[in-house]
Image: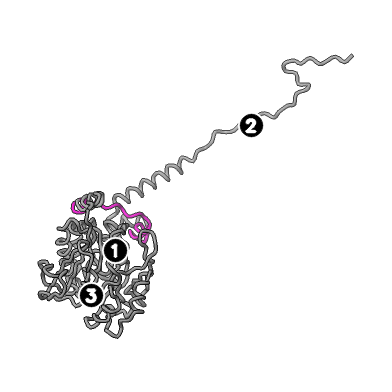
Amino acid sequence: MKVPKEWRLGSMGDTKILPGSRHRSPLKRPIWIILMVSFVSLFLVCAYIYPPNSDVACYVFSSRGCKVLTDWLPPPKRELTDEEIISRVVVRDILDTPPVESKNPKIAFMFLTPGSLPFEKLWDMFFRGNEGRFSVYIHASKEKPVHVSPYFLNREIHSSPVTWGAFSMVDAERRLLAYALKDPDNQHFVLLSDSCIPLHNFDYVYNYLMHANMSFIDCFVDPGPHGNGRYSTRMLPEVEEKDFRKGAQWFTMRRQHALLVMADSLYYSRFRDYCRPFADGKNCIADEHYLPTFFNLVDPGGIANWSVTRVDWSERKWHPKSYRAQDVTYDLLRNFTSIDMTTHITSNAGGEELLQPCIWNGTRRPCYLFARKFYPETLDKLVTLLNF
């Protein structure tokens, strides 16, 4: 009979012998590498916070000097000036304050003109039957206008002389806004010239502007000589070249944005002092740069970056294309009202065309409500063709 084997402690008969664990020497940590990395990191942090001021100190980093550091180190955050802090507080409070609701919201039509308005008859047709939904303000800089429409009678505000290209143009715009803001029912503000005409009937314009969630302020980057070439470093530190913008002066804006313009003194003073024709050898035109730059700095998401006033710069001259009586046709006006892409032309060599779809409350729509520049001789044809 087969007798089972007795298992005993230490018995090796049926047990596999496993290899014993190897003896490992303690891990040698590269302490010198850790110390070296820590030292270099500390050195760079100190150089960033306290940048070297002498050439000798710069060459500790590179034989190319200090510039090699600034090429890859992030720019240090600049401490805001007192004026900037005040400005940001005011801007924040105005934008965060809910708009005052009006039982009778109106659009303020602000005309910037040297004298009489040659298209007053056309505007009379446009306004007729919409009393109580609009206000009219006229800044006549040279002579008292002669009116043919009752909507324009006694609507002149206190005016001062305006010179093309001078900062007096910005002052005139602000003066118009100030008078229009006195009426709490004015909720949207439209700046127009004496050569502007409406392209749609009043209801279309009213609904387009009053239901928009933005202001229509032209704003784009022009790297050429008539764009960023006009920038002055004297605007530093509040206005940097990367924030400098250009755009047509013919805006429409919501009441909150009109209040921002009135409240601004910081950026207003920088452009008043350093954006002037032939200042520092540059021909800076303030009405083309102040508001685009201002809103790019304080509320870039609140503007459309295009104007609802059609202007044709395709001839690439100092002034946009003007229209004579023979130019005014049904097809011309229909083309204006169907355009849904806005075009900006830069002033650098070759003149790059920057195309942008016109987005209204998230939907692509035709861009233009108004157009310029039309000669007075076009009035009769426009009255017949538009027939509001």
Q: Earlier in the sequence, mark 2 or mark 3?
A: 2
- Residue picked out by circle 2: 22
Bounds of the magenta span?
62-85
The residue sitting at 79% across, 14% down in the picture is 6
Q: Quadrant of residue 123?
A: bottom left
Circle 2 residues within 10 Å: few <14, some 14–19, many ≥20: few
Q: Amino acid at mark 2?
A: Arg
Q: Amino acid at mark 1?
A: Phe
User: Depth check: 149 or 224 in front?
Assistant: 149
- Residue picked out by circle 3: 122
Tag 1 near tag 3, CB within 8 Å? no
Q: Quadrant of residue 308?
A: bottom left
Q: Earlier in the sequence, mark 2 or mark 1?
A: 2
Q: Taking 328 as reference, is 362 above or below it?
A: above
The colouring scheme, among rainbow, by chain, secondary structure or one colour, is one colour
Residue 98 picture location, percent across and down: 25, 49
The residue sitting at 11% across, 66% down in the picture is 157
Q: Earlier in the sequence, mark 1 or mark 3?
A: 3
Mark drawn on residue 216: 1
Q: Nearer the viewer, mark 2 or mark 3?
A: 3
Q: Amino acid at mark 3?
A: Leu
Q: Is residue 55 visible?
A: no
Residue 12 picture location, percent across and down: 76, 21
User: Depth check: 126 or 235 in front?
Assistant: 126
Cα distance between the residues tagged 1 and 3: 23 Å
User: Depth check: 222 or 71 in front?
Assistant: 222
Q: Secondary structure at mark 3?
A: helix
